[in-house]
Structures are given as C-alpha cells and as structure tokens.
Image: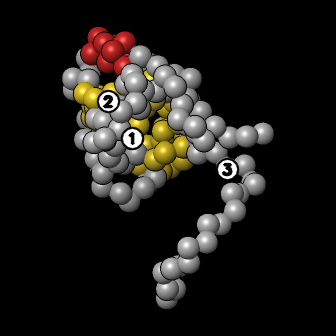
Amino acid sequence: MSSPDTSTEVPEMGTIDMKLEVVTLPVTDVDRAKTFYQSLGWRFDIDLVVSDDFRVVQMTPPHSQCSIQFGKGRTTAEPGSAQALILVVDDIDAARDDLISRGVDVTEVEEQRPPGLDAPGRSYFARASFTDPDGNSWELQEITTRLPGREWED
C-alpha cells in the first residue's frame, strides 16, 4: 500500500504527447444509444461486433478530437454513471437551439460564475445540459476566449 504524497514539490510537465482520444459511456441498449447519438448529428465511426458478448460503437461530435464509445462488454460501469461530460461550443445559444431542433431536452442556459470573479463576457461560465437515454449527462460550455495557460506550447 502506498502512502499519500505530502510533498509540495510540483512535478515537471510531461514531454510525451498524450491525447485523450475516446471516452467510454456505459449504456443499457447499444442500438438505442447509437440512434440517439446519430440524431445529434455526430459522426458515426464504427460498429464493431466481435462476438455475442462484445460490440463497440464509436461516434464523434462535430469537429471534436475526442470520440465516445459504448457497447456490450466494453465497461462494467453502471449505465448513466458518466456525468458532466463537457462539450465546448463557440455559441451556446446556437448549439442549444440545434439540439432542441433534433428533439433533445436541453436546460436553459445559465451563467455559473464563481463568487468574486469579475471577468467580462460569459466565456467558460455559460452552460446548459442534457442527458442521453441512459442518464449519462452532458454539459454545453461556451468558450470564446481561452484563459491564459490553456494552450500547449510547441
């Protein structure tokens, strides 16, 4: 058993490229999930049936570098347990309207600004949410200007 690190030393930034490529969602019905995510206008990447016990479907949100996978035999997580997955958008009102036009129940846009933070605009602070048929929850987050330090240097 390892003990918690109580050091105040900050480790060096990693130098090996590591890109988050896929997030796995737990679902109860693969075909229902596939239909839902296709209805969002997401790119269909693959539906790979390996056996009666293993099937993987991969979908990608428009212009995203990260995809989602769901299927049978893919994860032991409880369906609906993926929470607060964030989809960054330039215009949250347009993104919300698009999802509503596709039949998705999306909350009203709310600004969730931390107390005492007096930054102009609503970049990072405007959010709306929706869930898939299993209860996995998604948040739309408007980001129009990145905070300093949020870009990788080459």
Q: Amino acid at mark 2?
A: Arg
CA gap between label 1 and label 2 equals: 12 Å
The chosen color scheme is secondary structure
Dot 1 or dot 2: first in sequence order is 1
User: Which residue in the protein does label 3 denote?
Assistant: 18
CA gap between label 1 and label 3 equals: 19 Å
- Secondary structure of the residue carrying numbered label 2: strand
- Secondary structure of the residue carrying numbered label 3: loop
Asked whether the residues under the numbered discs 1 and 3 touch, taking CB atoms below 8 Å apart as contact, a structural biologist would say: no
Q: Position of residue 154 (x, y in %)?
A: 78, 39
Classify 10 Å Cα crowding around label 2: few (below 14), some (14-19), many (20 and above). Answer: many
Residue in the picture at 56% in, 23% down:
63
In the rendered image of this protein, does residue 116 appear above or below residue 36?
A: below
Classify 10 Å Cα crowding around label 1: few (below 14), some (14-19), many (20 and above). Answer: some
Q: Nearer the viewer, residue 46 or 13?
A: 13
- Secondary structure of the residue carrying numbered label 1: strand
Q: Position of residue 67 (x, y in %)?
A: 53, 36
In the rendered image of this protein, does residue 4 appear above or below residue 73?
A: below
CA gap between label 3 and label 2 equals: 27 Å
Q: Quick check: can you spot residue 37?
A: no
Residue 25, disc: none
Q: Amino acid at mark 1?
A: Leu
Residue in the picture at 73% in, 40% down:
153
Residue 85, disc: 1
Dot 1 or dot 3: first in sequence order is 3
Residue in the picture at 69% in, 62% down:
12
Q: Position of residue 92 (x, y in %)?
A: 37, 19
Examine the image and state in which quarter residue 22 appears: top right
Residue 127, disc: 2
Q: Quick check: can you spot residue 154?
A: yes
